[in-house]
């Protein structure tokens, strides 16, 4: 470990999907605990996911970077970041991305210290580990081990009173997020749970609980594929919430049921009990970051061919058997018997 001197401003680069940004957010806790609450933190993010930090007072600036691949001279957004760093030099740059398309940008940003690709290389002698832990190793050398270990993602959603003016939020409810980022791809959605299973789960839970259905704008039509019983306990929020609204709704929920998608990572970060349905994805590397404060319940069949994500085995599969065989009735029973529901 080598603690740095006079670290007052940091630029963090993370331009992945929303879930990637959520579990990477633990870097802020680590930096602030190590270098002080006065630290100025800026982020380079994908435009949509970057709104995650709207109410986060730890974040000074968010630079939206829509396109990764264009060279800096063809990218006004990259040039803006570089120009800002020339006027306001950073003390530390942390690149949490791994692709070469960020190399030129990170090299041109003005900063006294730089970590991550292409400046530092992570060793490959570690056992299989969660992706959030791998991202922590990028900056592990400049953070005390005990601080690094205790640092977790913390999120700040839309203030509750503001949220209640926008959405008719019940006093208590179970949240379900039946979609994921692959919903519109022209192939089997290997992360998906069958619509018939979602229908059975929601209908069964709605006999005793309010059930809030979550999803992004553009995903509203999925409910047309469900067979939901008429019930005032079933509340549709698909397409009605911003990212910070989503954080707040999940934080207030008794629990969340979802597949491997961004809401799962959000639930883990705000310590809402989580039931995550995983089939082709690896429960070690791909599950939300587990801490001392959260409850992450991974539900999977454990068949021999799983996990198989992005392998020939997955692409040869025609019926998504590892997701299909996760029984909705068993899940309903598990949830009802659980002590994890928020009071």
Image (cartoon, rainbow, N blue to C red):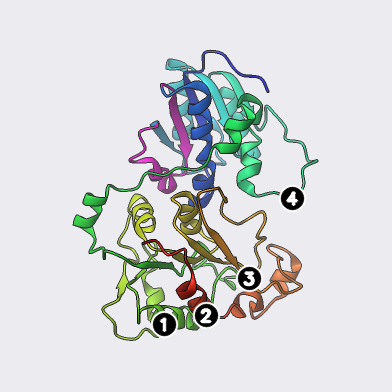
Q: CA distance from mark 4 to mark 2?
A: 30 Å
How many other residues sit within 10 Å of disc 1, few (<14), some (14-19) or many (≥20)? some
Q: Are marks 1 and 4 in contact (CB under 8 Å)?
A: no
Q: Are marks 1 and 2 in contact (CB under 8 Å)?
A: yes
Dividing the picture into quarters, in which one does residue 103 lie?
top right
First of labels 1, 3 by sequence position: 1
First of labels 1, 2 by sequence position: 1
Residue drawn at the location 40% of the way across and 85% of the way down: 227
User: Residue most toward the top?
Assistant: 6
* SS for dot 1: helix
Residue tagged by mark 1? 204
How many other residues sit within 10 Å of disc 3, few (<14), some (14-19) or many (≥20)? many
Task: Give the quadrant of the C terminus.
Answer: bottom left
User: Who is closer to the viewer here, 339 or 227?
Assistant: 339
Q: Position of residue 11 (x, y in %)?
A: 50, 28
Give the vertical position of 103 relative to 318 (above or below): above
Residue drawn at the location 26% of the way across and 78% of the way down: 232
The reply to whether residue 109 is in sight is: no
Q: CA distance from mark 1 to mark 4?
A: 37 Å
First of labels 2, 3 by sequence position: 3
* SS for dot 2: helix
Q: Magenta region: which residues?
A: 38-58
Residue 128's disc number: 4
Dividing the picture into quarters, in which one does residue 148 lie?
top right
């Amino acid at each position: 470990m080598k603690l740095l001197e006079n670290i007052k401003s940091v630029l963090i680069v993370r331009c992945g999907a929303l879930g990637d940004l959520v579990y990477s957010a633990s870097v802020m806790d680590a930096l602030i605990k190590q270098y002080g609450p006065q630290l100025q933190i800026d982020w380079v993010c994908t435009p949509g996911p970057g709104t995650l930090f709207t109410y986060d007072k730890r974040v000074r600036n968010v630079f939206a970077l829509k396109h990764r691949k264009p060279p800096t001279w063809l990218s006004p957004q990259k040039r803006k970041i570089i120009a800002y760093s020339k006027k306001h030099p950073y003390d530390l740059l942390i690149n949490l991305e791994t692709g070469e398309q960020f190399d030129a940008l990170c090299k041109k940003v003005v900063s006294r210290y730089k970590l991550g690709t292409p400046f530092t290389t992570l060793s490959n002698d570690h056992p299989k580990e969660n992706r959030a832990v791998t991202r922590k190793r990028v900056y592990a050398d400049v953070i005390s081990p005990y601080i690094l270990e205790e640092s977790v993602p913390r999120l700040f959603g839309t203030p509750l009173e503001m949220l209640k003016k926008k959405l008719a939020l019940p006093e208590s409810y179970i949240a379900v997020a039946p979609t994921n980022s692959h919903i519109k791809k022209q192939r089997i959605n290997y992360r998906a749970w069958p619509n018939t299973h979602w229908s059975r789960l929601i209908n069964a839970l709605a006999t005793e609980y309010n059930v809030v259905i979550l999803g992004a704008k553009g995903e509203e039509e999925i409910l047309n594929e469900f067979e939901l019983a008429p019930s005032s306990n079933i509340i549709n929020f698909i397409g009605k919430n911003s990212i910070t609204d989503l954080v707040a709704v999940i934080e207030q929920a008794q629990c969340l049921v979802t597949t491997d998608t961004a809401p799962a990572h959000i639930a883990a970060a705000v310590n809402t009990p989580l039931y995550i349905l995983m089939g082709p994805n690896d429960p070690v590397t791909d599950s939300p970051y587990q801490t001392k404060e959260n409850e992450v319940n991974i539900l999977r069949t454990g068949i021999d061919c799983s996990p198989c994500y992005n392998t020939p085995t997955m692409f040869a599969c025609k019926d998504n058997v590892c997701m299909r065989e996760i029984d909705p009735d068993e899940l309903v029973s598990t949830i009802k018997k659980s002590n994890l529901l928020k009071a």
